[in-house]
Amino acid sequence: MKYVKAFGRFWWDFIVGDDWTIAVGVAVALGLVAILVDQGVNAWWLLPLAVALLTGVSVWRQTQAG
């Protein structure tokens, strides 16, 4: 059981890391892209845009904090 717990913690730290809001934002963006593509929209550009915006927000929040 110890190995399963360690495996889960690794993936949590790897995906979520220090800022859970970024992980949620990327998950929402992935879901939105999937929905749009399913509807026939060419939405490949949405994910890179979302990542760039989320990175900017994360950097801005860190510079404001300290």
Image: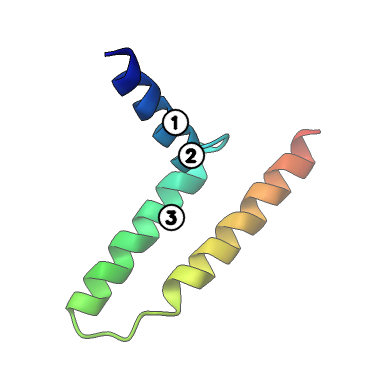
Mark 2: secondary structure: helix
Which of the marked residues, 1 or 3, is nearer the chain's N terminus?
1
Which is closer to the viewer, label 3 or label 2? Answer: 2
Where is 42 relative to 20, above or below?
below
Q: Position of residue 33 (x, y in %)?
A: 32, 70
Q: Which residue lies furthest to the front in this view?
A: 3
Residue marked by disc 2: 14
Q: Position of residue 40 (x, y in %)?
A: 21, 85
Q: Closer to the camera, 15 or 46?
A: 15
Q: Which amino acid does label 3 sit on?
A: Val
Count of residue discs: 3
Mark 3: secondary structure: helix
Q: Position of residue 29 (x, y in %)?
A: 38, 61
| Image quadrant containing the C terminus | top right
Alpha carbon of mark 1 to alpha carbon of mark 3: how far? 19 Å
Q: Do labels 2 and 1 touch, CB within 8 Å?
A: yes
Q: Closer to the camera, 5 or 33?
A: 5
Where is 28 relative to 13, above or below?
below
For disc 1, the neighbor class at 10 Å (few under 14, some 14 to 19, many from 20) is few
Residue marked by disc 3: 26
Q: Quarter of the image holding residue 37?
A: bottom left
Q: Do labels 1 and 3 touch, CB within 8 Å?
A: no
Q: Quarter of the image holding residue 35?
A: bottom left
Q: Looking at the rendered structure, which numbered label has been put on residue 54?
A: none
Residue at position x 50%, y 65% in the image? 50
Residue marked by disc 1: 10
Q: In this view, does 1 lie to the left or right of 55?
A: left
Q: What residue type is labelled 2?
A: Phe
Alpha carbon of mark 2 to alpha carbon of mark 1: how far? 6 Å
